[in-house]
Image (cartoon, rainbow, N blue to C red):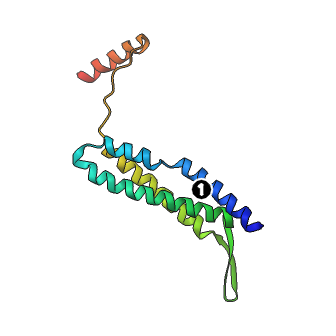
Amino acid sequence: MAATKKTGTTKKTNKKASARVLSEKELQTLIDAVPDERRKLAANIVSELVWMSKMMDTLKSKADEIGPLEWFVQGEQSMLRENPALKSYNTTIKNYATLLSKLTDLLPKATTSPPTSDAGDQFDDFVAGRDAD
């Protein structure tokens, strides 16, 4: 019965973890927005992001199952240590964020238009005039 509860908890955790990362569909949308000459590179990055997302789900489930700390025993020595799955998860999520940043860097730069509110126009005109000098 306990194994069934753990499995149920793991499935819920996987759904929660998946909600925090971009879905494959969302990542594909990003690929489509990348200019043609960089699209192959973007596809490679997305492939890694998808793999990392699945890996993070697995690592997070294992970390939830064991907890943040565990007793490590080697011979006569025993000590409390950080859960290796949690340690790997933390490393992977940092790498995921870095890769996601690289992917967004491949996207075309958005053009910004001046604000339409009258309140900001005078200040923006002042700054634009000052910067033109």
Asked whether the viewer can see residue 67, the reply is no
Say which quadrant the N terminus sits in: bottom right
**In the figure, 119 relative to 33: above or below?**
above
Quadrant of the rendered image containing residue 75: bottom right
* Residue in the image at 32% along x and 40% along y: 33
Furthest residue in direction top, as rendered: 118
Which residue position is annotated with label 1? 14
- Residue at the extreme right of the image, as rendered: 1
Q: Position of residue 30 (x, y in %)?
A: 37, 43
Viewer-nearest residue: 10 or 117:
10
Q: At 39% from the left edge and 48% from the top edge, which residue is drawn? A: 101
Tell whether 5 sits left or right of 13: right
Taking the image as shown, residue 49 lies to the left or right of residue 79, namely left
Residue 76: percent from the left, percent from the top? 70, 88
* Residue 86 placement (x, y as % from top left): 59, 64
Q: Amino acid at mark 1?
A: Asn
Q: Helix, strand, or loop for circle 1? A: helix
- Residue 105 in view here: yes
Q: Is residue 117 above or below residue 79?
A: above
Quadrant of res 121: top left
Quarter of the figure that contains the C terminus: top left
Number of marks: 1
Residue located 35% across and 18% down the image: 124
Decide: few, some or many residues near mark 1? Use Cα within 10 Å; few <14, some 14-19, many ≥20: some
State the image coordinates of residue 85 (x, y, percent, origin top left).
58, 67
User: In the rendered view, would you say 130 is above or below 44?
Assistant: above
